[in-house]
Structure formats: structure tokens, C-alpha cells
Image: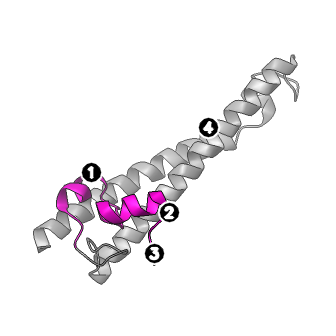
Amino acid sequence: MNKRDIKHFEERLIEERLKLMKELGHFEDKIFNNSQRDAAGDLSAYSVHMADQASDAEEREKAYHMASAEGRLLYHIDEAIARLRDGTYGCCLGCGKQIQKPRLEVVPHARLCIDCKKAEENGSLER
């Protein structure tokens, strides 16, 4: 990978990281910092009806799952940035071969080539 490619992928990863940080900030501000009363828009601490309470709880649960997924993606992006800086970016962590650029364009934080990713998903990737 040449310097231009490395700069391109670094910019992509940083852009993705900033976008994720903004989304995680949204989750924190709008969902996690709201009390049940704020979420229900009511003066009491509880929703008027049990169905409303269940809906509120379900929405909070969805938000936790989405934030968890965003957090995992942020971790993978940070790991890719670290690989960029130590010179191992673009090398498959499974087989050591170069990850193809089209794959990195789609998934800039990819740590495995297509073949190793398929093997991982099938449960047959040996480390």
C-alpha cells in the first residue's frame, strides 16, 4: 500500500470515527440521560399505563443495543487506526496476506481478508 492509499484510508477511518462519536453523543444526550419521567413526558415518575411503560422500556433497550453496536464499531475503527500507525494496516490478521483494496473501501476497518472472514463466520478460522 502506498502513502496515498494510507492517507486515504486514514481520512476515511477518522471520518467514520467522528460520525460514530457524534451518534454515541446523541444516544447519551437524548436517551441515556433521560429519566423515565422525561421519556414519558409526564410529571409523575411512571407512565400512566403499563403499555406505555413497556414501550418506553423497549425503546431504551433498543437504544442500548444500538449504542453497544456503535461502541464495538468504534473499537474496530480505533484498532484499524492503530494498525495504520504501526504499518500493519491492510494485512489480514488471519493469514497475513494483503486485504484487497475494494474490501477496504467498503469496510475500512476490516481486519480479515474475504476468505478468512468467511472462515471466521463459519467457525473454522484457526488462529
State the separation of the CA atoms marked 2 and 4.
38 Å
Residue 4 location (% of width, % of height): 11, 68
In front here: 112 or 33?
112
Tell me the colour scheme of the image.
one colour
> Which disc number belongs to residue 65?
none
Quarter of the figure that contains the N terminus: bottom left
Q: Which residue is mark 2?
A: 123
Relative to 115, 71 lies left or right: right
Quarter of the figure that contains the C terminus: bottom left
> Which disc number belongs to residue 106?
1
Q: Nearer the viewer, mark 4 or mark 3?
A: 3
Which amino acid lies under the numbered mark 1 shown in the image of this protein?
Answer: Val
Residue 76 location (% of width, % of height): 44, 63
Q: Disc 2 vs disc 4: Cβ atoms closer than 8 Å?
A: no
Residue 47 location (% of width, % of height): 84, 22
**Is label 2 in a helix, a strand or a loop?**
loop
State the separation of the CA atoms marked 1 and 2.
23 Å
Ranked by sequence position, the earlier of labels 4 and 1 is 4
Q: Which residue is mark 3?
A: 126
Residue 94 location (% of width, % of height): 37, 74
In front here: 119 or 42?
119
Q: Residue at x 24, y 56 (%)?
A: 103
State the separation of the CA atoms marked 4 and 1.
30 Å
Q: Residues within 10 Å of mark 4 (few under 14, many from 20)?
A: few
Q: Nearer the viewer, mark 2 or mark 4?
A: 2
